[in-house]
Image: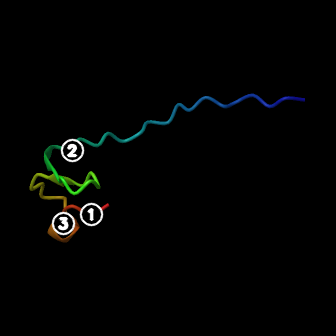
């Protein structure tokens, strides 16, 4: 008996990021704009 995949009807939250610059260190770290909900100590970190 094969199982059928269940469809996902859940609403996923949307995240909108504004990337201002990308580092040129070869690691692809993005520097995000100053958004009030983004803590300053997390800038440039994954």
Q: Which residue is mark 3?
A: 39
The Cα atoms of the two marked residues, 1 and 2, are separated by 14 Å
The structure residue drawn at horizontal position 42% and vertical position 39%, both measured from the top left corner, is 12
Q: Quadrant of the N terminus?
A: top right
Q: Nearer the viewer, residue 13 or 41?
A: 41
Dot 3 or dot 1: first in sequence order is 3
Q: Nearer the viewer, residue 14 or 17?
A: 17
- Secondary structure, mark 3, is loop
- Secondary structure, mark 1, is loop
The structure residue drawn at horizontal position 29% and vertical position 55%, both measured from the top left corner, is 27
- Secondary structure, mark 2, is loop
The structure residue drawn at horizontal position 50% and vertical position 36%, both measured from the top left corner, is 10
Which mark is on residue 17? 2
Quarter holding residue 19: top left
The structure residue drawn at horizontal position 12% and vertical position 58%, both measured from the top left corner, is 36
Which mark is on residue 45? 1
Dot 3 or dot 2: first in sequence order is 2
Q: Quadrant of the C terminus?
A: bottom left
Mark nearest the camera among 3 and 1 is: 1
């Amino acid at each position: 008996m094969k199982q059928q995949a269940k469809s996902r009807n859940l609403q996923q939250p949307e995240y909108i990021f504004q990337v201002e610059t990308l580092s040129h260190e070869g690691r692809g770290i993005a520097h995000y704009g100053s958004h009030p909900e983004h803590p300053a100590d997390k800038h440039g970190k994954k």
